[in-house]
Image: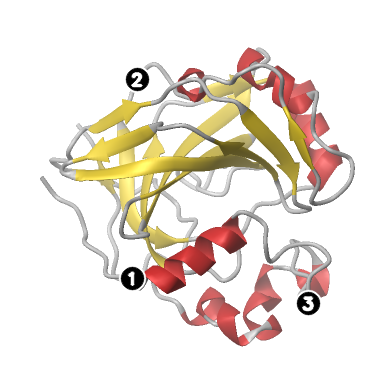
Amino acid sequence: MRYMSSVVGLASLCMALNVYAGAEGHGKEVHWGYEGEHGPAHWAEMKAEFKQCDAGLEQSPVDLGDATKGDLAKIEFSYQPSAVKVLNNGHTVQVNYSGDSSIKIGAQVYKLVQFHFHSPSENTVKKKPFDMELHLVHKNDKGELAVVGVFMQGGTANQTLEPVWANIPKEINKEATLTAQINVAELLPAKRSFYHFKGSLTTPPCSEGVQWFVMKEPTTVSAEQVKSFVAAVGNNARPVQALNQRSVVASE
C-alpha cells in the first residue's frame, strides 16, 4: 500500500478550503481569474498568500499519462443523498453538500464538503483534456484535504446534474437551495480504478498537501451542459503543472 503522507497546518488548510469554496473570489480585495493579467501566470504576484502558485513544487493539476501501477488502498465511498446549495462564485459552479457523506482510504476518513466543476478538465491524460472535470472536495478531522476528480466527456446528458444546472445563480456569490436532494454517488463512474498523486489546490492560494484521486473512467456530459456551464463562469482550467520529483501511481 503506497501513499504519500502530508503534514499541513490546520489553519493553513482551513483557509485554503475557504478559498477553494470561493471566499477569496469575485468582489474581494484580490480579483483572480483565468485570462490576461488576472490569469494563472500572475496569481503569485497578486497576494503574498498566493506565492505557492509559483514557488510550490507539488502543484496541481498534472498530466497523468506516465503513471506507474502500484499497490493502492481502495477508496471506500460512503455517499448519501443530500440537500444542496448551488453557488456561482464567479470562478466555478460549486455545490455545497451536507450530511455525513465521506470516503475512507486506509484508516483515514474524509468528509465530503462540496463539489465543483472545471471546463476543460484541469488534469489531463497524455496531454489530452476532457470536456469537463468534477472535483469532489473532502476534509478529515485534522483539516487535511482529499480531492476525488472525475473526468467528464461529451456524450449523453448527465441527468443528476440537470437540477444543479437549472438553478445556477446568475448573481455572483448568491446561493440557490435545491428542493430535491442530490445523490452524489450517481456522479461517479461505474469502475473505480484511479490515479493518485500528492498535489495542491488548483486555485489561489494553491496550498499543497492535498491528496488527489482521479478516476480513470470518465462519465458523460452533454454539449449543451458544457455550453451552459461555460456561459455561466467561462473556461476555468489552470494549466498543467510540472511533476518535479513526484510520481503518479495508478491503481491496479
Can you tell which quarter of the image residue 101 is in? top left
Q: Quadrant of residue 5?
A: bottom left
Name the residue carrying label 2: 191
Residue count near mark 2 (Cα–Cα under 10 Å), binned few <14, some 14–19, many ≥20? few
- Seen from the viewer's position, the closer of residues 179 and 66 is 179
Q: Which disc is residue 8 wearing?
A: 1
Give the labeled residue for mark 3.
29
Quick one: SS at disc 3?
loop
Cα distance between the residues tagged 2 and 1: 31 Å
User: Disc 2 to disc 3, how far (Cα)?
Assistant: 43 Å
Labels 2 and 3: the sequence-earlier one: 3
Q: Residue at x 21, y 33 (%)?
A: 74
Residue drawn at x 89%, y 40% is 170
Name the residue type under label 1. Answer: Val
Residue type indicated by callout 3:
Glu
| Horizontal and vertical percent position of residue 63 | 45, 52
